[in-house]
Image (spheres, helix red, strand yellow):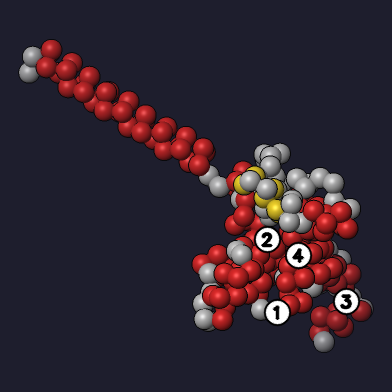
Amino acid sequence: LPYSYILHQEYKKEKKGLKLKKVLCGILLGTMLFSTPVMAAETNENFVAWEDLKTYSEEIGEKYNIDPYILQALTENESRLYIKAENGDCKGITQINIKYHAKRMETLGITDIYDPYSNLLVCADYLSDLKAEKDDIYYILMRYNMKTSTANDMYEKGEISNYADSIVKRASELSLNDLRAAKTAAKEQADQEAKEQKQNDALAESERRISTGMDGTLPKGGAALWTEWT
């Protein structure tokens, strides 16, 4: 084949390789840009870290008798954990309406609605009031998310909003994930303890054999011979 033809074919291969690299780089960049804030929260100060959210939700959830997984799922749904999230008068990680809840914030002593803990506290306080009206998590979440009249109409018809349904499902998923993690950790702990016990038993047996001369390090006689015979 002509040398020029061979060079042209090599050029096409190299060009194709460059295109593939560009595509892969584009996919990687897109993944980085559009990955959920929940993942980014581990390193980005603009997002509340997931472990911090878990700690806050467990403490506040215990105080108000609200499932912490509901608080976590609600926060994830409302803001993707973005601390400065805004939608009109709705602010922060749980999108608190600062006009509607101005009195509540004053009562709770909240001055910074963008503080994750404070924001979640206002949310839980409101959910607690709604729970006192009707202890049904679906109704509570519908009331939290929409007008009272709309929520009541839907509830009376036996309907559940997609918002409420998605949060309950996500809360169940988070709970299941933690349960699986706890079981895995417990199994690993049990395996480690069993391994250590086996090592201790082997060490004790080795020491016993040395002390009785059964390992050949001491002349067999007296007690050593009697131990071996028995």
Assess disc 1: are there few (<14), some (14-19) or many (≥20) residues with their C-alpha within 10 Å of its C-alpha.
Answer: few
Assess disc 2: are there few (<14), some (14-19) or many (≥20) residues with their C-alpha within 10 Å of its C-alpha.
Answer: many
Question: Disc 2 and disc 3: Cα gap in Å?
Answer: 66 Å
Task: Say what amino acid the circle numbered 4 marks.
Answer: Tyr
Q: Nearer the viewer, mark 2 or mark 3?
A: 2
Q: Give residue 203's quadrant in the image.
A: bottom right
Q: Is residue 47 left or right of residue 157?
A: right
The first of marks 4 and 1 along the sequence is 4
On the rendered image, what quadrant is the N terminus found in?
top left
**Is residue 27 visible in the rendered structure shown here?**
yes
Question: Disc 1 and disc 2: Cα gap in Å?
Answer: 21 Å
Task: Tell me the residue that label 1 is attached to.
Answer: 134
Q: Secondary structure at mark 1?
A: loop
115 above or below 67? above
The first of marks 4 and 3 along the sequence is 4
Assess disc 4: are there few (<14), some (14-19) or many (≥20) residues with their C-alpha within 10 Å of its C-alpha.
Answer: some
Task: Tell me the residue that label 2 is attached to.
Answer: 72
79 above or below 206? above
Task: Say what amino acid the circle numbered 2 marks.
Answer: Gln
Q: Secondary structure at mark 4?
A: helix
Query: Where residue 148 appears, x then y in whole percent?
Result: 63, 69
Q: Nearer the viewer, residue 192 or 115?
A: 115
Question: Disc 4 and disc 1: Cα gap in Å?
Answer: 13 Å
Q: Residue at x 79, y 64 (%)?
A: 125
